[in-house]
Image (cartoon, rainbow, N blue to C red):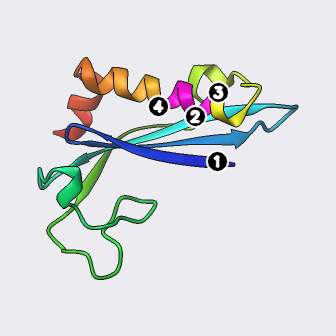
C-alpha cells in the first residue's frame, strides 16, 4: 500500500494505492475532505490520516469528509502503485475543480 495527499483549494485529497484483493496490481482509493476553517494549506497544523489536527494542533482546524471511494474505476487493477495514485489524485482534482454536485451535497 502507498498513500499520498495534496490540497486543492479548500479540499484535502488523500489517495491510496491498495494491493488488489484478487490478483496482481493495485486499486486506487480516494478520500476528499472539505476544510471547514478556510485556512490556506500553509497555515494549517499537521493532520493525521483522518484529517484531524495532529497532537498540539489548533482545535479550530477541522475537515469534513465529503467523498470516499475505495475502488475507483470499478476496481480496475493498475500495474503500479504510482499509476493508481496518479489516477486517484487526478480524479479527485477533477471533481473538486468542476465543483461536482457529489461534493456539494455531502458538504451541506
Residue 100 in view of the camera: no
Occupied quadrant, residue 71: top right
* Circles 2, 4 touching at the beta carbon (< 8 Å): yes
Residue at mark 1 to residue at mark 3: CA–CA distance = 11 Å
Question: From mark 2 to mark 4, how far is it between C-alphas?
Answer: 6 Å
Q: Which quarter of the picture shows residue 75?
A: top right
In the displayed structure, does residue 75 sit left or right of residue 21? left
Magenta stretch encompasses residue 30: no
**Is the C-beta separation of discs 1 and 3 under 8 Å?**
no
Dominant SS type (magenta): helix
Instruction: Report the residue at 68% width, 42% height from top.
Output: 18
CB contact under 8 Å: marks 1 and 2: yes
Indicate the secondary structure of the residue bearing disc 4: helix
Q: Which residue is mark 1?
A: 2
Q: Which residue is identified by label 4?
A: 89
Determine the residue positioned at 26% across, 67% down.
45
- Relative to 47, is 92 above or below? above
The answer for how far apart the CA atoms under marks 2 and 3 are is: 5 Å
Say if mark 4 contacts mark 1, CB within 8 Å.
no
Q: Residue at x 22, y 55 (%)?
A: 42
* In this rendering, position of residue 36 left or right of residue 74: left
Residue receiving disc 2: 85
What is the span of residues highlighted in magenta in the rendered image?
A: 83-88
Name the foreground residue: 1 vs 75. Answer: 1
Question: What percent of the width, then of the height, locates residue 69?
Answer: 50, 35
- Residue 51 horizontal side relative to residue 88, left or right: left
Which comes before the other along the chain, label 1 or label 2? Answer: 1
Instruction: Identify the residue under disc 3.
Output: 83
* C-alpha distance separating marks 1 and 2: 8 Å
Q: Are marks 2 and 3 in contact (CB under 8 Å)?
A: yes
Amino acid at each position: 500500500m502507498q498513500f499520498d495527499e495534496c490540497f486543492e483549494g479548500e479540499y484535502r485529497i488523500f489517495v491510496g494505492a491498495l494491493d488488489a484483493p484478487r490478483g496482481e496490481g493495485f486499486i486506487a482509493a480516494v478520500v476528499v475532505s472539505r476544510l471547514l476553517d478556510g485556512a490556506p494549506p500553509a497555515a494549517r497544523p499537521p493532520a493525521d490520516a483522518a484529517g484531524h489536527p495532529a497532537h498540539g494542533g489548533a482545535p479550530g482546524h477541522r475537515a469534513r469528509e465529503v467523498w470516499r471511494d475505495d475502488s475507483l474505476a470499478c476496481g480496475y487493477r493498475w500495474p503500479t502503485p504510482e499509476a493508481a495514485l496518479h489516477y486517484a489524485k487526478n480524479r479527485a482534482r477533477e471533481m473538486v475543480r468542476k465543483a461536482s454536485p457529489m461534493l456539494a451535497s455531502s458538504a451541506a
